[in-house]
Amino acid sequence: MYCNGEENYTEEDESRAEQWQNYMKTKKAKLQYQVNVLDKHENISCIFKGISIFVNGYTDPPASELRKLIHLHGGEFHIYYKYGTTTYTIATHLATDKVKKLRKGEKIIHPRWLTDSVKAGIRLREDDYLLYKDGALQTAVAKRLAVGNFGASKVAQCAANDPNFVNNFYERSRLHLISTLAQEMKHYVNELRENQSNNFPSRVRLQHLVDENFANSPKETICHIDLDCFFVSVALRTHPELIGKPVAITHSRSTEGAGMSEIASCSYEARARGVRNGCFIKEARKVCPDLICLPYQFDDYRHISKEIYAILSGYTLNIRAVSCDEMYVDLESLCKEMHIANVMEIISVIRSEILTKTGCNASVGIGNTMLIARIATRHAKPNGQFMIKLDDIDELIKKKKFLLYPELKVSINRLQNLLGEKIGTQIYNMCRGVDKERNFLEKVVRKSISCDINYGIRFTKEDEVMEFLGKMCSELEKKLHIARMTASTITLRLLIRAPDAPLVTENIWDVGNVMRLQERLM
């Protein structure tokens, strides 16, 4: 109950809170017992004896492998982080807000410390692998962010005054580009279907594959096409002298590597040196000092992506667009109509045409479902093709070769009760490599369209807020027009500085301590 704006808890509320705390305490203890006692592997060394780890976010290798690694070598794995008990947090990087909240003695270490220690047979020095040390580094990290490559203070000042701020933001936003291109490609595929007369001019390239003894279409006809390092491949078209060198695509304009821009895409040569998509430039240059950074080429991504979809439409219209550099193709009708049984040869011809016309390498996985085809792509990369035969699926899954888990001892009925009939059935089937979705011609309808900017914006006057909202509405209108949709419901979300929050945040990019207000209009 609430009275005069202050929270007054009844004895019943306190009892419920205590019950909840006891429940969570028991749950954590149970999970720790399951992970570190029941499921623990037999030790093969004591490299990490006395060490406990907690994995934060995505890592390479993933948390499941790190858990096995720490157990095999004498350590302990924590499902939940506990300050003062957990020795290390394993991560590749942390969000700015989490970095600022680091406490004394907390250690964030790169997963390579574990893998390199195992390879060396001894526990290596942690100093070479620590991302951030004690909380004393928070200020240094904040300063590093504040002097990033965009000139953060300048951006913050112009957010309220620059009439082109919204347009410039979306023109330079990588995530906005990826989202927009994904929708554009889906619409483009629909346009290709509407304008195509089903002549399929490119099929002439497949005449040499016609089988006079053709009887039935092969069962493995669904192909997952993934363009290798797409952003890098596009850049190398105009920079052929950089082929074979470590290249990354980023907003960073720094030549000395002091920036904190994230890497959107990097070449396989850069990956071989330890660079990963999503890592900061400064961290990347520690492992690869000669890393070459190139800017985004948004217009080229759009143009080349459309060219690739157009190439595919010359063979079939059974295309499902996923993004600007990823799509599925079902070749079943092509095989039946042309009497071709060799899907691998068809894909070889298509990949060759894509490379010749766009200069981009494509890796392709082939299977009887989209799920299996996507898994096959893991073995196809880089710049290859791989097929998983229907008869081989069960054996491959049993070996956990593709990280699928058929041995999960959860019945379909239990999953349906927990998650609902549709999702429960879908997860049960996918754990066993079964994916019944195959209708590529069905149009996917978007359920929502949004505009969201919380980057470097500081308003002090009401008219600044209203003017900015007007620009956001114009941007939302553009998105609706591109998607060919109208809105039945509009939701407005505002972030307002909390009364006790400082006027100037520690990091200009951060929204700081805010109150979140949301209103829905029908």
Image: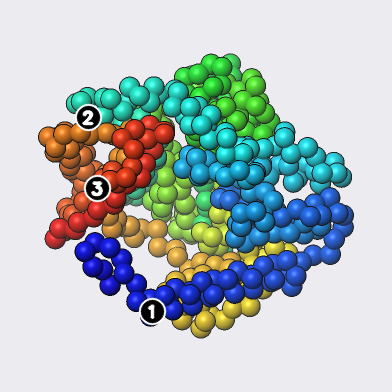
Amino acid type for the residue under numbered disc 2: Ala
**Residue that carries the numbered disc 3 in the rendered image:** 494
Which mark, by number, is residue 224? none
Looking at the image, is mark 3 or mark 1 nearer the viewer? 1
Contact (CB < 8 A) between labels 3 and 1? Answer: no
Which quadrant would the N terminus be assigned to in this image? bottom left
Q: Say which element carries label 2.
A: loop
Amino acid type for the residue under numbered disc 3: Leu
For mark 1, does the 10 Å Cα neighbourhood hold few (<14), some (14 to 19), or many (20 or more) residues? few
Which quadrant would the C terminus be assigned to in this image? bottom left
**Residue that carries the numbered disc 1 in the rendered image:** 11
Q: Say which element carries label 3.
A: strand
Residue 3 screen position, x and y as percent: 23, 68
Contact (CB < 8 A) between labels 3 and 2? Answer: no
Residue at 84%, 50% (x, y): give it: 47
Q: CA distance from mark 3 to mark 2?
A: 16 Å
**In the image, residue 477 above or below residue 245:** below
**In the image, residue 140 above or below residue 184:** above
Residue at 87%, 54% (x, y): give it: 45
Q: CA distance from mark 1 to mark 2?
A: 48 Å
**Residue that carries the numbered disc 2 in the rendered image:** 160
Q: Nearer the viewer, residue 210 or 102?
A: 102
**In the image, residue 442 above or below residue 228:** below
